[in-house]
Image (cartoon, grey):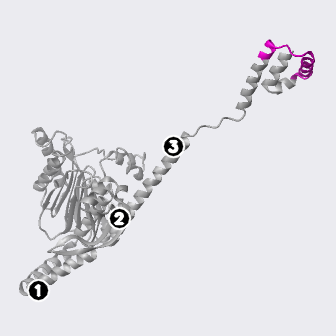
Amino acid sequence: MARAKRKKSGATFGSRTDVGCVREHNEDSLAVAPPLYVVCDGMGGHAAGEVASEIAVDVICDRAPAHPDASALGQAVEEANLAIIRAAREGVGRAGMGCTCTAAMLEKDKLVIAQVGDSRAYLLHKGQMQQLTRDHSLVADLIEAGQITEAEARVHPQRSVITRALGSDPRTQPDLFELTVEAGDRLLLCSDGLSTMLEDDQIAKILASHSEPQRCAAQLVNEAVGRGGYDNVTVIVVDVTGLAEQHRRKLTRKSRATAIMLALLLVAIIAGCAYGFNYLASNAAYLVAQDGKVAVYQGVPGDIFGFSFNHLDRVTDVALDDLQPGTANRLREEGVKVDSLEAANSLVAEYEKEIADRRAAEEEAARAAAEANQPEEPAKGTEGAGGGAAGGEQGGTDSQDTEPPAGAGSGTTGKGTGNPDAGARGSTAGGTSGGTNR
């Protein structure tokens, strides 16, 4: 399962990881220890990939500098690489295990990143999102060489091949980035389980639509899982707040703690809980399997203190048997949680489009197969040529077996002799008959 390290801090952040719909184990690991944030995606299978990613997270957390320093952070990543190689030699995990790594340190307006592999870092700045890191992958190299487009890369058969990873080579070095950020910016670190399931514009829309980073992280993972969840999905969302905002937050926390100590009453607790549950029931939603169809519920699944905070919104026409097996199984077993009824309806629309596209492709394939199996029509003139040949052979046989009447033979011979060109222009049958009579 995923390894997560967290440390209390004044930073505003959120994180989430999920095994997805296909994999049996979560080989991702993450660390949230402000000002340090790390995402590692393990490779090598169960008891290998998760071991490598855990080693990387542990070493980086132990060796990272106290404050943002690109060179020192890069050195910590290099030490993590050597630690994975050493562990494999000593029989910990498996030979060939490895992981990607994207580590970031954010403090005030300074952001530094060390990256190996295809786990990414994005920055949302004034509503515009940009990818800060460059994937160390085969398809990224092909895109840069102009051999394929980004759209083609998303479906390329070798899209999972990476060209650099921790644990593969003791000389591996990370790419280093150093940026100046502003209050209001939002940083996203993610494994490829997110970036392969969602387009960049979809990621940007979710990053910009939630004020709370934890809710944003949850929505990103939910969307990736809802679209198939073919890989483990891990995200960290960090808001850049600036010094003034951090100072205001400290004052607010102190004032809130004092007020709670003076005014906390049992009635207030009950009222607060009721409000919270009602808020969840009014804003959250989830999709589950019901009578072989996909059903949309508003609220939260299950009971809380014996009370149900959900109700059926609608049963859709989407049949579970028409969905991908991983998606259908998740809907049957635990459902797919989303943050709003609108998000649930959008997910249903995605399912409907996926089914319609697949059916259209199947119909087109069937039509093409039917056309390919139809017999070809004979070319024009083929029957005439064959008939002529047959007639010629018949004429030759007649000339050998039967003596034609004198009058008939004389007439035919005269017709053929008088116009030799007509024999050339006529059918094969006519020419052969004249020769036989003569």
Residue 156 percent location from the top left of the image:
38, 46
Image marks 1 and 2: residues in contact by CB distance under 8 Å: no
Q: CA distance from mark 3 to mark 2?
A: 33 Å
**Which residues fall within the magenta stretch?**
396-420
Which kind of residue does numbered mark 1 sit on? Val
Given contact means CB atoms under 8 Å apart, are the residues at marks 1 and 3 in contact? no
Residue lying at 42% horizontally and 47% vertically, measured from the top left: 148
Q: Which image quarter: residue 210? A: bottom left
Q: Is residue 264 visible?
A: no
Tell me what residue is drawn at x 11 percent, y 86 percent. Answer: 267
| Vertical relation: 174 (above or below) 236 | above
Q: Earlier in the sequence, mark 3 or mark 2?
A: 2
Q: Nearer the viewer, residue 82 or 373?
A: 373
In the rendered structure, does residue 417 fall within the stretch colored magenta? yes
Q: Earlier in the sequence, mark 1 or mark 2?
A: 1
Check residue 369 in the rendering and tell me which mark sits there, or answer none.
Answer: 3
Q: Residue 267 — which label?
A: 1
Expressed as whole percent of the image width and height from the top left, the position of residue 294 reads: 33, 63
Q: Main secondary structure of the magenta part?
A: helix
Please identify the quadrant where the C terminus is shown: top right
Q: Is residue 205 left or right of residue 303?
A: right
- Residue 25 coordinates in the image, percent (x, y): 19, 51
Q: Give yes or no for residue 335 being in the magenta stretch.
A: no
Is label 3 or label 2 in front?
3
268 lies above or below 201: below
Q: Left or right: 398 with respect to 273? A: right
Q: Amino acid at mark 3?
A: Ala
Lower position in the chain sequence, tag 1 or tag 3: 1
Amino acid under disc 2? Leu
What residue is disc 2 on?
347
Up/down of 301 relative to 122, above or below: below
